[in-house]
Amino acid sequence: MRDYDAIYPLDKWRDPDYKVMDKFSLNGKKGFVTGGAGGIGRNAAAAWAEAGADVAIVDIEPKKGELEALAAELSERYGVRVVPMLCDVSDREQVAALKTQLVDELGTVDIAFLNAGVNVPGDDADEPYEVWRTTIDINLTGAYMTAQIAQNIMREHGHGGSLIFTSSLSGHNANYIAGGPSPVAAYGATKAGIYEYARYLGAALAPYGIRSNVISPGYVWSGIHVGRIDDAVHDAMIDVVPMKRFGCNDELAGALLFLASDASSYITGANLQIDGGYAIY
Ligand code: NAD
């Protein structure tokens, strides 16, 4: 008979050195966040930096100035290394270069938030091919390519890690607004694809100690919405949200720290809805 008490400790809390809050620490961890200049991305990077990780914030060339200022501010505030990195996640060569840069500058990758995404205007039933294609390339293929470099680094360096993907409520529902569906046709398709891809990786990468989970935000007050909707649209959107409001970026950060850290060490292939209850309906 195996010593199951040793394999599965029943009461770790009785160990005077054990503290559950220690599991949330990211001290010494290295990570990267795509869409790192955006609302959800930069708040995740801030949470990881506060928890002790060195973090690369990754975004596109037009965000260079913003990204550099943000990296300086986060490094200064949290006393860790926060490095800006430019990469269009839909470009294969740029993603390959990102892998080299991550290893050169951080040494390795333990945690990765595959979060870059766009909702392109015209994404409805009559959408042009270009809208469909851009959305698939950035959201779905971008998530796949950046997850590949992350898990390859983890496996090449012989350690585990945590991958977190940004799906969306729109990957599960058609987003009912003002009498019909929101224009998220290709967007929703990419987010549904991300959800299943992340779940697959959860099973395939478990033997390597790599976990893979998904967040599905509902309506979050961030770059995707700020300045893009008026009061009437805002009110119509929250009508279907039980909490009757948007979420704030910081309300995702705790979940992103949880999923990155050992506090979620037995969780893989999971989808965490962060949506004020929208998915209940
Ligand atoms: P945001 O616009 O503030 O951030 C998105 C970031 O992705 C931007 O900084 C943008 O420059 C970057 N990006 C765009 N294309 C890129 C590319 N090709 N390569 C690298 N970076 C690129 O919006 P956000 O709300 O922070 O969005 C983050 C993620 O959350 C997205 O995947 C979005 O689809 C998802 N999401 C957002 C909401 C919401 O309500 N805000 C809801 C569900 C899901």
Image: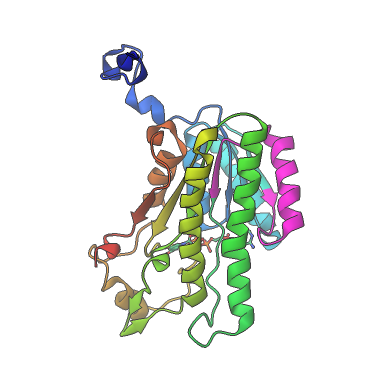
Q: Position of residue 153 (x, y in %)?
A: 66, 38
Residue at the limit of the structure toward the bottom, as seen here = 126
Asked if one can make out residue 211 in the rendered structure from this viewpoint, the answer is: yes
Q: Is residue 164 above or below residue 177?
A: above
Residue 114 among magenta residues: no
- The quarter of the image holding the N terminus is top left
Question: Residue 276: which quarter of the image?
Answer: bottom left
Q: Position of residue 18 (x, y in %)?
A: 34, 17
Q: Nearer the viewer, residue 177 or 5?
A: 5
Q: Is residue 91 left or right of residue 162?
A: right
Q: Position of residue 231 (x, y in %)?
A: 35, 78
Q: Is residue 202 above or below residue 8?
A: below
Residue drawn at (40%, 62%), measured in percent from left and top?
220
Q: Position of residue 226 (x, y in %)?
A: 46, 68
| Colour basis | rainbow
Q: Is residue 108 above or below residue 14?
A: below
- The quarter of the image holding the C terminus is bottom left
Residue drawn at (69%, 63%), measured in percent from left and top?
62
Count the labels in the image. 0
Q: Is residue 119 above or below residue 38?
A: below
Q: Nearer the viewer, residue 98 or 227?
A: 98
* Magenta residue span: 85-113
Asked if one can make out residue 163 in the rendered structure from this viewpoint, the answer is: no
Residue drawn at (33%, 79%), measured in percent from left and top?
177
Question: Residue 107: which quarter of the image?
Answer: top right
Residue 101 among magenta residues: yes
Residue at the limit of the structure toward the front, as seen here = 1
